[in-house]
């Protein structure tokens, strides 16, 4: 049974394993400092195993940002990401954000549109 948990602070090893499975080439990171400054984050658990995750970063004011939306490949196409993004949207609103931003690749346009996001123009500089 799938359970969504708000602010679960999963272990770094759990997050790195999920991101590695979901994204392929992943460089392990320590998430403790990141998650402690997040507005919210949601973990999707199946039998106490982390199978999905989304982080709601923020600017400390009215802007929040969805980052790291991930679902384990074995669990994709089951509505998990949609449920996490909708809960993240509700939490961002409840916690005082007035705008929720997300950047995504073109093939995810339909997904984010179905979650209520509308297209905007934005800029991006790759720093690494």
Image: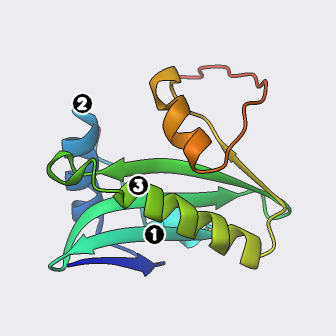
Vertical arrangement, residue 73 with respect to residue 91, above or below:
above
Count of marks overlaid on the render:
3
Q: Mark 3 sits on what residue? A: 81
Q: Mark 1 sits on what residue? A: 42
CA gap, disc 1 to disc 2?
A: 23 Å
Find residue 25 and name its label: 2
Lateral position of residue 16 relative to residue 87, left or right: left
Q: Closer to the camera: disc 2 or disc 3? A: 3
Label 2 environment density (alpha carbons within 10 Å; few <14, some 14–19, many ≥20): few
Q: Position of residue 9 (x, y in %)?
A: 40, 75
Q: Position of residue 42 (x, y in %)?
A: 45, 69
Q: Quadrant of residue 1?
A: bottom left
Q: Closer to the camera: disc 3 or disc 1? A: 3
CA gap, disc 2 to disc 3?
A: 20 Å
- Lower sequence index among marks 1 and 2: 2
Q: Closer to the camera: disc 1 or disc 2? A: 1
Q: Position of residue 51 (x, y in %)?
A: 24, 62
Residue at horizontal 72%, vertical 31%? Answer: 119
Q: Position of residue 48 (x, y in %)?
A: 18, 79
Find residue 125 and name its label: none
Q: Nearer the viewer, residue 127 or 42?
A: 42
Label 3 environment density (alpha carbons within 10 Å; few <14, some 14–19, many ≥20): many
- Asked whether residue 8 appears in the rendered view, the answer is no
Residue at horizontal 56%, vertical 63%? Answer: 86
Lateral position of residue 52 relative to residue 74, left or right: right
CA gap, disc 3 to disc 1?
A: 10 Å
Label 1 environment density (alpha carbons within 10 Å; few <14, some 14–19, many ≥20): many
């Amino acid at each position: 049974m799938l359970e969504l948990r708000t602010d679960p602070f999963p272990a770094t090893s759990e997050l790195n394993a999920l991101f590695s499975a979901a994204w392929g080439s992943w460089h392990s990171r320590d998430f403790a400092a990141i998650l402690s400054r997040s507005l919210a984050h949601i973990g999707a658990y199946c039998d106490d195993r982390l199978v999905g995750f989304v982080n709601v970063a923020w600017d400390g004011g009215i802007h929040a940002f969805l980052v790291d939306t991930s679902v384990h490949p074995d669990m994709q196409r089951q509505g998990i990401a949609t449920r996490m993004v909708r809960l993240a949207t509700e939490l961002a609103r409840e916690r005082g954000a007035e705008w929720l931003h997300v950047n995504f690749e073109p093939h995810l346009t339909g997904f984010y549109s179905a979650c209520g996001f509308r297209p905007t123009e934005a800029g991006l500089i790759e720093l690494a």
